[in-house]
Amino acid sequence: MGNAIIAAENVSVIRQGNQILQDVSVDIGADDFITVIGPNGAGKSMLLKCLMGFYQPDHGKIIRKKDLKIGYVPQRLMADNTMPITVRRFLSLRKKTHEASLQSTIEETGIEEFLDRQISVLSGGELQRVLLARSLLDDPELLVLDEPAQNLDIVGQISFYKLLERIYSERDLSVLMVSHDLHLVMASTRKVICLFHHICCSGEPQTVAKDPEFISLFGTEMANMMAAYHHNHNHTHDGGSDV
């Protein structure tokens, strides 16, 4: 495991006779920002769920740092109109939170103006900000996001990823995300893992874009677009030097 805070070692998952994950090994270290990409049905969400302990792999193992705090932002939340609940109440449902910490997170994620609205009437972008705020309340060491901008329009996607980049820059945490919107997160992502049941390739975005397996899965247009970005993101904590 080395310096990793969480790791998958030779993880395989089989469901109904289908190989979802095959011999997958991943290390997430302190201060990492890793984006997992791959076609639909490639096993991306299953990998996240195994890492978080929602599912046990059929083979291999998951190793976590002791008492690792994980915040999770799912793809979507189905809000039931028959069970009205405000944003403010939703944020306090799971656990008690110090008022100062709650207020700080509310301001950080920009959700002050709709705290007293019903969850069910929020726009997609507003709801994702609320889910992000809730995931940050425990001050997690690892923030896990499963296609958090999937149901947002392009303006909402850009806004959400800018917020995520700022949170990553200002907080002492690691980020592990599944996303189809790699061209929008290039400024933050340090490492890309290309998954298609097994790890096809991994590394810095520009390196992965040149890999034949990536080009085979996503085509030359996406590869050229990724290669055109210049990754120059500084991640600094507590006024320290760039990492």
Image: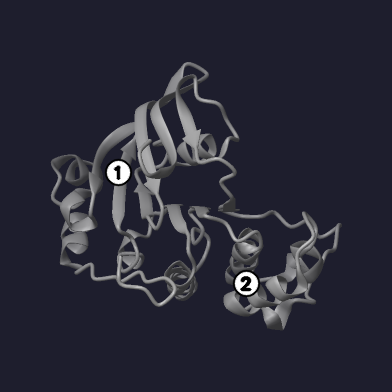
Location of the N terminus by quadrant is top left
Assign a secondary structure to mark 2: helix
Quadrant housing residue 180? bottom left
Instruction: Please state which amino acid type lies under the numbered disc 1.
Output: Cys
Q: Residue furthest bottom?
A: 113
| Residue 73 visible to the viewer | no
Above/below status of 16 relative to 116: above
* Residue 59 place in picture, x, y as percent: 45, 19
Q: Distance between the Cα atoms at labels 2 and 1?
A: 29 Å
Residue farthest along the top direction in this orientation:
17
Residue 126: which numbered mark, if any?
2
Answer with mark 2 or mark 1, whichever residue precedes in sequence: 2
Mark seen at residue 137? none
Q: Around disc 1, counting alpha carbons within 10 Å, would you say few (fewer than 14), some (14 to 19), or many (20 or more)?
A: many
Residue drawn at x 35%, y 48% is: 37
- Location of mark 1 (residue): 194
Q: Is residue 242 left or right of residue 209?
A: right
Q: Which residue lies at the image location 34% right of the left edge and 44% below the top edge?
A: 38
Report the residue at 40% width, 43% height from top. 4
Seen in the picture, residue 227 relative to 199 is either above or below; the reply is below
| Residue 183 in the image, given as x and y percentages of width and height | 30, 64
Rate crowding at label 2 as few (under 14), some (14 to 19) or many (20 or more) other CA atoms within 10 Å: some
- Quarter of the figure with the C terminus: bottom left
Q: Is residue 75 left or right of residue 198?
A: right
Residue 222 sits in which quadrant? bottom left
Where is residue 165 drawn, in percent x and y? 42, 70
Q: Amino acid at mark 2?
A: Glu
Residue toward you, 113 or 64: 64
Residue 65 screen position, x and y as percent: 50, 41
Q: Are marks 2 and 1 in contact (CB under 8 Å)?
A: no
**Secondary structure type for disc 1:** strand
Residue 151 visible in the snapshot = yes
